[in-house]
Image: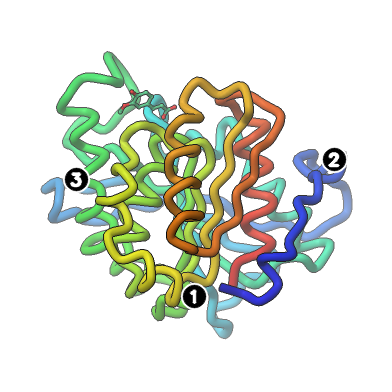
Amino acid sequence: MNDSIPDYTMQTAPAGYDKEREGIARGIIHTVEYPSRAVGNTRKAMVYTPPGYSAEQKYSVLYLLHGIGGDETEWYNHGKPQIILDNLYADQMLKPMIVVLPNGRAMLNDRAEGDHFAPDKVQAFETFESDLLHDLIPYIEANYPVRTDRMHRAIAGLSMGGGQSLNIGLNHLDRFAWIGAFSPAPNTKLPELLLPEPQKAAELLSLLWLSCGDLDNLKNVSDRTHAYLSQHSVPHLWVEENGDHDWPVWKNGLYQFSKLIF
Ligand code: FER
């Protein structure tokens, strides 16, 4: 962990942090398609490149995951990450990073339609581990000027995507040094399975962020994870916010987490 983390006190995101500001440089957000062996088709993701993006530079990468009712456009449509990040860059508060918004429902029809809780759809959020590690990350690394070591790769997400970030990130600490979960859902593995070797995680993690709204019906998932991390002395940031299972908590999560990584 960073030495500074234990003393970290949560700063509330300033008013206007998610409002488009006039006269600042802007990043670009676009859709890409990549071949997926895990699913056997071509899949979509959105990619945000920061203001002043240049192939002459090397960037870190944040993989930012959506919830059970979303797809690769969910953050873009509801969270406006490009506005939050543009504002942070304007204030020189972010390291140069590319943000990838994948579709975490790794199945042939991955559109957010029908019964989101159907067993095959829930299963597809587990299949995503292979799609991410073996298909999407290699695609990003082949097509963007990015650093490819664990210290320059982060994973974070909201709800179902928060559970994925914990499950995938903590199971692959050789790939991710920075992990964030905003209101993680019940797909989050039970603590003993999530972190069978807490000592190893404590040594390897640069940042483990866990946040949840106090009114969230799924808060028991965060509570049990936080309790286990504390019992086993795994440094982490536990941020209990005023809020529900909703965008203000997730956008604040992105704002706070992105400032701390890399
Ligand atoms: C569940 C309740 C909620 C669950 C997933 C969710 C897999 C996900 C919620 C979200 O992503 O917003 O029981 O089980």
Q: Is residue 227 above or below residue 68?
A: below
Counting residues from the start of the chain, the first of labels 2 and 3 encountered is 2
Residue 177: name its quadrant: bottom left
User: What residue is shown with label 1?
Assistant: 152
Image location of residue 118, percent across then percent down = 21, 19
**Location of residue 64 with respect to 219 vertically, above or below:** below
Residue drawn at x 48%, y 77% is: 151
Q: Residue at x 50, y 20 (%)?
A: 217
Relative to residue 188, is residue 122 drawn left or right? left
Q: Amino acid at mark 2?
A: Gly
Name the residue tied to disc 2: 16
Percent across and percent down for residue 45 are: 39, 48
Question: Which residue in the protein does label 3 denote?
Answer: 127
Beta carbon at label 1 within 8 Å of ligand 1: no
Mark 3 neighbour density, 10 Å: few (under 14) some (14–19) many (20 or more): some
The residue lying furthest to the top in this view is 114
Residue plotted at (45% across, 35% down): 159
User: SS class of the residue under badge 1?
Assistant: helix
Q: CA distance from mark 1 to mark 3?
A: 24 Å
Separation (CA) of disc 2 from disc 1? 28 Å
